[in-house]
Image (cartoon, grey):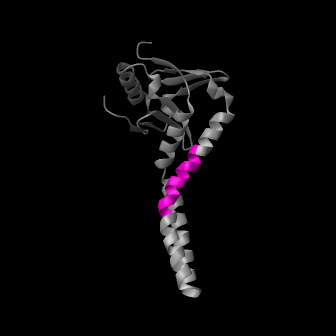
Amino acid sequence: MADSVAVSFEYRVEDFISASRWVVARSPRTYLICGCIAALFLLVGLLIWWYADQAMGQTFMIASLAGGLLGYPLLLVGVTAHTRKSFDANPAFRHEFHWMLSPTEVTINGKGLSATLELANFQRVAETPFGFVLWQAAGIYNFLPTRALPDHETLVRVRKILRQGLPGTARVQLRSN
């Protein structure tokens, strides 16, 4: 097909880490978790301050601020560690993948993996500094690194295919050409 784009590449652990961190950093769940942790520390600090020792209560209230500020970076450290462990545990990622993007579907082939996904079924696509994140569902996404694209023309064609093929209800966050 004239409008299709074919790319071949091997995933790197850095690809997975950058995609996972990007997704987690933009998830509302992340901010909810960090806010709940900070609120819990603040509540415990207030209770201790009222009913027990004021100095210890102030310590817990300061810890609530530290928990709120440090919760986010610590969460990203945990995501990085989990992603690296998951990547190392899956031998399928150590082989070459072939992606074929057409205006209607994405075909992904690799050792032990073959999938054809219709673009109309994707809920969201976003272009990150490291590649394209395509969501099939809330926690299920595919990642196409931009380093796999040989030139700027291919990058422009991928953006065009994604804009045309995604349904009108999908959230599209692509950069301009």
* x then y, percent, for residue 18: 50, 38
Quadrant position of residue 80: top right
Direction from residue 158 to residue 76 in the image, left or right:
right
- Residue at the image point whose x is 40% and y is 37% from the top: 172
Name the residue at 68% across, 23% down.
112
The residue lying at 52 percent from left, 69 percent from top is 63
Res 152 quadrant in image: top left
Q: Nearer the viewer, residue 131 or 89?
A: 89
Q: Main secondary structure of the magenta part?
A: helix
In-image side of 81 versus 19 (left or right) = right
What span is colored magenta in the figure?
Answer: 68-80
Residue farthest toward the top in the current orientation of the protein: 1
Counting from the top left corner in percent of width and height, residue 95 is at: 62, 22
For the N terminus, the quadrant is top left
| Numbered-mark total | 0
Q: Which residue is depicted at the point 53% across and 49% down?
A: 76
Residue 28, percent from left and from top: 48, 53
Which x, y percent locates residue 110? 62, 21
Height in image: 135 above or below 2? below
Residue nearer the viewer, 7 or 167: 7
Establish if 76 lies above or below 46.
above
